[in-house]
Amino acid sequence: MGRLTELQRQVLEYRFAAGLTGAEIAVLLGRKENAIKQLQHAAIVRLRHLLAEERHAPPAESSRQSRSSSSRVLQWTKNDTAGEKVNCGPPLSAMNS
Protein backbone atom coordinates (compact mmCIF):
# COMPACT_ATOMS: atom_id res chain seq x y z
CA MET A 1 0.00 0.00 0.00
CA GLY A 2 3.05 2.21 0.20
CA ARG A 3 2.84 2.91 -3.53
CA LEU A 4 -0.70 4.31 -3.33
CA THR A 5 -1.41 7.99 -2.80
CA GLU A 6 -2.16 9.11 0.74
CA LEU A 7 -5.84 9.65 -0.16
CA GLN A 8 -6.13 6.22 -1.73
CA ARG A 9 -4.63 4.62 1.39
CA GLN A 10 -6.99 6.56 3.65
CA VAL A 11 -10.03 5.55 1.59
CA LEU A 12 -9.07 1.86 1.66
CA GLU A 13 -8.32 1.95 5.38
CA TYR A 14 -11.61 3.67 6.22
CA ARG A 15 -13.59 1.44 3.85
CA PHE A 16 -12.15 -1.98 4.60
CA ALA A 17 -10.42 -1.74 7.97
CA ALA A 18 -12.93 0.55 9.67
CA GLY A 19 -15.96 -0.60 7.63
CA LEU A 20 -17.19 2.92 6.84
CA THR A 21 -19.49 3.70 3.92
CA GLY A 22 -18.51 5.92 1.02
CA ALA A 23 -20.73 8.66 2.39
CA GLU A 24 -19.09 8.47 5.82
CA ILE A 25 -15.62 8.60 4.28
CA ALA A 26 -16.64 11.58 2.13
CA VAL A 27 -17.64 13.52 5.25
CA LEU A 28 -14.40 12.63 7.05
CA LEU A 29 -12.20 13.64 4.11
CA GLY A 30 -14.28 16.64 3.02
CA ARG A 31 -14.90 15.23 -0.46
CA LYS A 32 -17.89 14.19 -2.52
CA GLU A 33 -19.03 10.58 -2.28
CA ASN A 34 -18.41 10.04 -6.01
CA ALA A 35 -14.79 11.17 -5.54
CA ILE A 36 -14.41 8.58 -2.78
CA LYS A 37 -15.74 5.85 -5.09
CA GLN A 38 -13.27 6.92 -7.78
CA LEU A 39 -10.37 6.92 -5.31
CA GLN A 40 -11.34 3.45 -4.08
CA HIS A 41 -11.59 2.09 -7.61
CA ALA A 42 -8.25 3.62 -8.64
CA ALA A 43 -6.57 2.21 -5.51
CA ILE A 44 -7.88 -1.30 -6.15
CA VAL A 45 -6.81 -1.19 -9.81
CA ARG A 46 -3.36 0.05 -8.74
CA LEU A 47 -3.02 -2.74 -6.16
CA ARG A 48 -4.08 -5.31 -8.76
CA HIS A 49 -1.35 -4.09 -11.11
CA LEU A 50 1.25 -4.03 -8.35
CA LEU A 51 0.41 -7.60 -7.34
CA ALA A 52 0.62 -8.71 -10.97
CA GLU A 53 4.04 -7.06 -11.30
CA GLU A 54 5.24 -8.93 -8.22
CA ARG A 55 4.13 -12.21 -9.78
CA HIS A 56 5.55 -11.24 -13.20
CA ALA A 57 2.16 -11.87 -14.75
CA PRO A 58 -0.04 -9.61 -16.85
CA PRO A 59 -2.67 -7.82 -14.75
CA ALA A 60 -6.22 -9.12 -14.78
CA GLU A 61 -8.79 -7.07 -16.62
CA SER A 62 -10.33 -4.28 -14.60
CA SER A 63 -13.79 -4.95 -13.24
CA ARG A 64 -15.32 -2.49 -15.73
CA GLN A 65 -13.73 -4.28 -18.68
CA SER A 66 -14.73 -7.75 -17.51
CA ARG A 67 -18.35 -6.68 -16.95
CA SER A 68 -18.62 -5.24 -20.45
CA SER A 69 -16.87 -8.13 -22.19
CA SER A 70 -19.42 -10.43 -23.81
CA SER A 71 -16.80 -13.13 -24.47
CA ARG A 72 -15.97 -13.59 -20.78
CA VAL A 73 -17.98 -16.07 -18.74
CA LEU A 74 -19.14 -14.44 -15.53
CA GLN A 75 -19.07 -16.85 -12.63
CA TRP A 76 -20.19 -15.04 -9.49
CA THR A 77 -23.17 -12.93 -8.62
CA LYS A 78 -24.46 -10.56 -5.99
CA ASN A 79 -27.91 -9.28 -5.12
CA ASP A 80 -28.85 -5.88 -6.52
CA THR A 81 -31.08 -3.48 -4.60
CA ALA A 82 -34.21 -5.39 -5.66
CA GLY A 83 -32.77 -8.71 -4.48
CA GLU A 84 -32.16 -10.00 -8.01
CA LYS A 85 -28.96 -11.86 -8.84
CA VAL A 86 -26.51 -9.77 -10.92
CA ASN A 87 -23.41 -11.13 -12.67
CA CYS A 88 -20.30 -9.34 -11.37
CA GLY A 89 -17.25 -11.06 -12.80
CA PRO A 90 -14.97 -14.02 -12.36
CA PRO A 91 -14.19 -15.41 -8.94
CA LEU A 92 -10.98 -14.08 -7.38
CA SER A 93 -9.30 -17.44 -7.81
CA ALA A 94 -9.72 -17.15 -11.58
CA MET A 95 -8.23 -13.64 -11.56
CA ASN A 96 -5.17 -14.82 -9.64
CA SER A 97 -4.32 -17.70 -11.95
Image: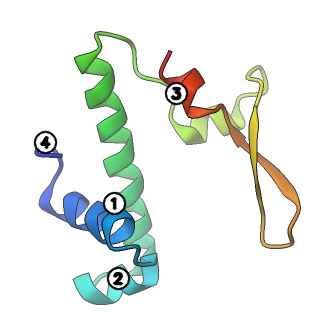
| Helix, strand or loop under label 2 | helix
The amino acid type found where label 4 is placed reads Arg
* Label 4 or label 3, whichever comes before in sequence order: 4
- CB atoms of marks 4 and 3 within 8 Å: no
Tag 1 residue: 39
**Tag 1 secondary structure:** helix
Image position, residue 76 (x, y; %): 73, 39
* Whether label 2 touches label 4, CB < 8 Å: no
In this picture, is 39 found above or below 65? below
**Badge 4: residue crowd in 10 Å (few <14, some 14–19, many ≥20):** few
Coordinates of residue 66 in the picture (x, y in percent): 63, 32
Between 68 and 14, the one nearer to me in the picture: 14
Q: Answer with mark 2 or mark 3, whichever residue precedes in sequence.
A: 2
Query: For mark 3, what is the residue?
Result: 61
Type of residue at label 3?
Glu
Q: Amino acid at mark 2?
A: Ala
Q: Hey, which quadrant is residue 19 in on the image? A: bottom left
Does label 1 or label 3 sit earlier along the sequence?
Answer: 1
Please tell me which of labels 2 and 1 falls first in the chain. Answer: 2
C-alpha distance separating marks 1 and 3: 18 Å
Q: Which residue is mark 2?
A: 26
